[in-house]
Amino acid sequence: MPTLALLVASNCFMTVAWYWHLKGGMEKPLWIVVLLSWSIAFFEYCLAVPANRLGYAHGWSGGQLKVTQEVITLAVFAVFAVFVLKEPLSWRYAGAFACLIGAAAFMFVGK
């Protein structure tokens, strides 16, 4: 459970680092946006690296960690897209999420 919590928290930072500037930050110079994004992403790494080490130490494979990360990424981005970017979710989000859930199931089945 700590691995999942750390992965969710790290994804929140990374989603903000990558996409915050799309809503209200487009007028800022790119170099400033890059520096600010790198500053935010630092905290993502401070959470993601321990999450992966902890998960691996508890028997998760690298593939399981990566696929789980992708599922969390899409879920976090979907919330961000709706509430920050004000974009509606479409069937494409649901389809992509279903595919990732299937990928995660394949990675964990029989383990």
Image: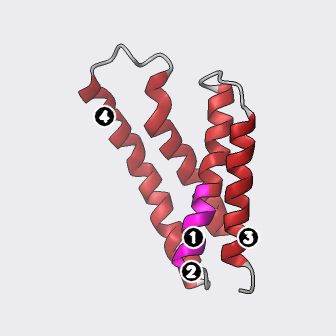
Measured Cα–Cα span from mark 1 to mark 2: 6 Å
Q: Height in image: 91 above or below 97? A: above
The first of marks 3 and 4 along the sequence is 4
Measured Cα–Cα span from mark 2 to mark 3: 13 Å
Nearest the eye: 57 or 102: 102
Measured Cα–Cα span from mark 3 to mark 4: 36 Å
Residue designated by label 4: 34
Q: In the drawing, what numbered circle is on residue 105?
A: 3
Q: Is disc 1 in contact with disc 2, using a CB cutoff of under 8 Å? A: yes
- Magenta segment: 61-70
Q: Please state which amino acid type lies under the numbered disc 2.
A: Ser
Mark 3: secondary structure: helix
The first of marks 1 and 4 along the sequence is 4
**Count of all numbered marks drawn on residues in the image:** 4
Residue designated by label 2: 61
Q: Residues within 10 Å of mark 3 (few under 14, many from 20)?
A: some
Mark 2: secondary structure: loop
Mark 1: secondary structure: helix
Which quarter of the figure has residue 101?
bottom right
| Residue 63 counted in the magenta span | yes
Residue shown at the point (61%, 83%) measured from the top left: 58
Q: Please state if 98 lies on the left or on the right of 24 as rendered.
A: right
